[in-house]
Image (spheres, grey):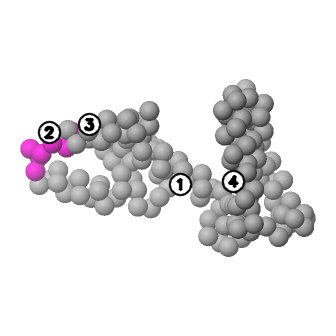
Amino acid sequence: MHTKEEKLKAFARLLDVQERLRKECPWDRKQTNESLRPNTIEETFELADALLKNDSKNICKELGDVMEHVVFYSMLGQEKEEFDVADVCNAQSDKLMFRHDFIDWTGWEVTRQDMAVNANGQVVYKDELKQQTSDNQQAAPNTATQVESTWEQRKTARKRWK
């Protein structure tokens, strides 16, 4: 298997290839979100088929096709100055961290401006963090209720992701 550095280099290569195709290939130049959508659906079904067959060779191939579409849509977003592939990756990382509140994320960066890591190492929305801070200052006896609530949230999250 590859090192993290090799994986990053491979992803950078994909970005470079796709940028060149967008500039030099007539088909790639004329693509839009709407024109790519049917191809994306087809590639997703091909991936699902390979997964059902547990066909590692084709899973790898089809993941590449789906990844290429993610990169392409990100380039289209970048051209409109709406988002780029870094925004996509960061948003997904933030979402995963938020959904896995039973993991301690202390020391990890959250890129969304409306989110932060609280004192318990959970990723929360900042308005919730302000509310938690205010509640803690006003009513320390509610700590047991907060612990119970957190426990229930974790149980719900675990059920959701099993």
- The residue under label 3 is 151
Whole-Å distance between the Cαs marked 3 and 2? Answer: 10 Å
Q: Do the residues labelled 2 and 4 touch (CB within 8 Å)?
A: no
- The residue under label 4 is 41
Whole-Å distance between the Cαs marked 1 and 2? Answer: 32 Å
Q: Earlier in the sequence, mark 3 or mark 1?
A: 1
- The residue under label 1 is 91
Q: In the rendered view, does 97 fall on the left or right side of 155?
A: right
Residue span colored magenta: 139-147
Give the residue type at disc 4.
Ile
- The residue under label 2 is 144
Q: How crowded is mark 2: few (under 14 residues within 10 Å), some or many (20 or more)?
A: few
Residue 13 percent coordinates (x, y): 80, 48
Q: Is mark 2 on a helix, strand or loop?
A: helix
Q: Earlier in the sequence, mark 4 or mark 1?
A: 4
Q: Residues within 10 Å of mark 3 (few under 14, many from 20)?
A: some
